[in-house]
Image: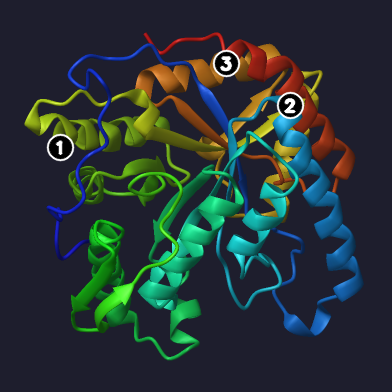
Amino acid sequence: MYDSLLSPERPREKTPNSSRPLKTTIKPWIFEQLNTSADPSASTHCRDAFQEEFAWRLNLWTEAEHLGFHGIFFSEHHFSGARISPCPGILAAALAARTRNLRIGILGWVLPLWHPWRFLEEVAMLDHLSGGRLEVGVARGSNPLEAQAVGIAQEDITPMFNEALDILDKAWRHPTLSHHGRYWSFDQLPMLPRPLQRPGPPVWATIRSNASAQEVAQRGYKACTGFLATPQIKELFDNYRSAWTANGNHCNPDRLAVRRCIFVAQSASEAREHAQAAQTQIPSILTDDIIAGTPDAVIEQIVEQARLTGAANIVGFFAGNRENRASFENSYRLFGTQVIPTLQRTTMN
């Protein structure tokens, strides 16, 4: 996946005793992609309906802090009415102004669509706006048609992504940034402001193959899976850990995240009903992607998968059954009030 594996300018994240495991509890996150419609067509887009839904979701995201969520990840998508999230940094800025402790991330910025210097400037500004709460996710893009629509050939997407990562890996180490590559070249650019977090915010990447898991670890990034079956996730994370520990460092479970579609209800049958409705609305949701049930059953499934995979972060997509707002809100709040308190007390040991 990557052209260059590890830039010497970006050291791995350290802890005071990086060779020893830390006591870690399970951290819950939200994954948001603004699936506001089942219709991708621009001709049927209703600006008033989008404004109303956006305001409703912004209130739900703000509530996440009070419900105990550790953070939220927004995604970047273009040119489709099914997922309207072209400016995730703006969403992050809006939520940062409404919250104080919630970690706020993008998973991920589609780097082939960005000038690297512009991306770095936006990251730094968001880190200051959020008071140092930003999490940076990097992506090639889940749909190559988005890049092709603006003139980027499919065969250029991966090498552009790799080159953008090489630039990210050496950013913020010096007052200015220089780079000479196949797609971008610049000399002595003053990268201002510098991020509030030092040397920069945590960086995440999505992994889907053993090779990408090893390469992400070698770059020093944290790893989140796509929506995959648990045995496959364990294999990916085993490869990540193997690459991470090659130099004798312990890989803390905080570095790893499992992504799931989550449905919580007062009864198991109701939760299953909402999960099935979500699969009808979004056919790409597979049974292996789903955690559904009563609060106790959801806790059991999350803890089992976290311990099996060695991942201390659960990233939940709660908006699958978008057409039933009551079930969406109920699931979201049940998770906050009855699932999160137990997760916060549950260690990975």
Quadrant location of residue 263?
top right
- Relative to 287, 19 lies left or right: left
Element type at marker 1?
Answer: helix
Q: Are marks 2 and 3 in contact (CB under 8 Å)?
A: no
- From the viewer's side, name the closer residue of 197 and 34: 197
Circle 1 packing at 10 Å, graded few (<14), some (14-19), many (20+), is many
Which part of the image, by quadrant, shows the N terminus?
bottom left
- From the viewer's side, name the closer residue of 208 and 313: 313
Residue at x 19%, y 44% (from the top left corner): 11
Please say which color scheme the image uses.
rainbow
- Relative to 345, 94 lies left or right: right
What residue is pinned by disc 2? Answer: 67
Q: Amino acid at mark 2?
A: Leu
Distance from disc 1 to disc 3, alpha carbons, whole Å, reads: 28 Å
What residue is pinned by disc 1? Answer: 243
Element type at marker 3?
Answer: helix
Q: Amino acid at mark 1?
A: Ala
Quadrant location of residue 160?
bottom left
Residue at x 48%, y 44% (from the top left corner): 227
What residue is pinned by disc 3? Answer: 343
Image height of 234 relative to 209, above or below: above
- Relative to 219, 317 lies left or right: right
Distance from disc 2 to disc 1, alpha carbons, whole Å, reads: 36 Å
Of pointers 1 and 3, the one earlier in the residue sequence: 1
* Position in image of residue 321 (x %, y %): 76, 45
Residue at x 20%, y 50% (from the top left corner): 215
Judge depth for marks 2 and 1 and give the one in front. 2
Quadrant location of residue 305?
top left
